[in-house]
Amino acid sequence: MTLPLIPPMLATPGRLPPAAQDERWAYESKQDGQRVMVYLPGDGGVLLRARSGEEITGAYPELRPLGGALGRAAAVLDGEVLALDEQGRADFQLLQSRMGLAHSPARAARRAAQVPVHLVLFDVPYLEPPLLGVTYAERRARLEELGLTGPYWSTPAAVTGHGTEALRATREHGLEGLVCKRLDSAYEPGVRSRAWVKIRNMRSEDVIVGGWLPGKGRLTGLPGAVLVGQRAGGRLRYVGGVGTGWSEAERTELAALLRAAAGTECPFDPVPRIPDAHWVLPRLVGEVSYSTRTRAGLLRQPSWLRLRPDLTPEESSADVPEGER
């Protein structure tokens, strides 16, 4: 049968619901993967679409057997494709080696043998009859009744109430964060809804500024991003570029500090390949937040928090993890 095209419902960044409303919400762990809508027409086939609507079925051949999991029942499922590290945690860098292979079946098959993925399912917006207007609580119950557990897919549990404890558990287990879903909410295709709230677990560390990139458009003449590093083994290792987190006044102040610290040589060892970079003497210390690190030690999703005039580069405690040196 022909299934309706359903864009995924999106969560709004925010905070935990008030304690008085805690029991009106369910809590699901958030892991770093690729959002997918799974189409099961009931004929043994399966079709995967990315959040953009692009068909990506060919990138994940190990998920094809899911097509027969519901027999002749037709369904549209909402989930996340993950690549797991040795500790069983989602590793987006691992997953990147699987993405983009939808039209390269031979390469996709080889990578599947080396880096298998796991699909976590958390909603069912379509199951004859359609469930878009049905509450989250009812949809979740229907999803769990389907018993979708297999070698490469599962339906992790959601917790009703106990939001504070759920968020704490995600932090203790090194997960990306938490998604809070209102029990009485309908499924809103393609909408970034306040009925779903995502909370990302962010870390913060001190970094040393070693360069910057010029801004464009309204930021012409100002830094568009700063290039930062951390000390490791007596060297200043490049850990990424930070382009968000400043107010206009803070960006202007930072521009003056960067001009005063202008240098002629790159302070990072090894030297990163960054076109149009302006190098500075490594004497400014700042604090940044980030979600996690890549395997090369780079910061993912970094955002500027503040300058640290109270610290010298030598006093900065930040360091590249041992495994990435």
Image (tube, helix red, strand yellow):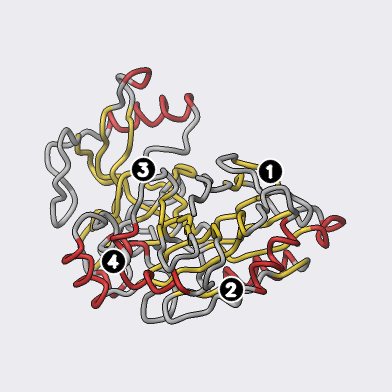
- Callout 4: few (<14), some (14-19), or many (20+) C-alpha neighbours within 10 Å? some
Q: Mark 2 points at which residue?
A: 156
Q: Which amino acid does label 1 sit on?
A: Arg
Q: What residue type is labelled 4?
A: Arg
Whole-percent x, y for residue 184 in the image: 79, 53
SS label for mark 2: loop
Q: Name the residue under label 3.
A: 242
Mark nearer the N terminus (4 vs 2): 2
Q: Do callouts 2 and 1 mark residues in contact (Cβ within 8 Å)?
A: no
Q: Distance between the residues labelled 4 and 1?
A: 34 Å
Q: Residue 194 carries which label?
A: 1
Q: Nearer the viewer, mark 4 or mark 3?
A: 4
Q: Which of marks 2 and 1 is in front?
A: 2
Rendered position, 71 above or below 231: below
Mark nearer the N terminus (3 vs 1): 1
Between 304 and 46, the residue placed more toward the observer is 46
Q: Do callouts 4 and 3 mark residues in contact (Cβ within 8 Å)?
A: no
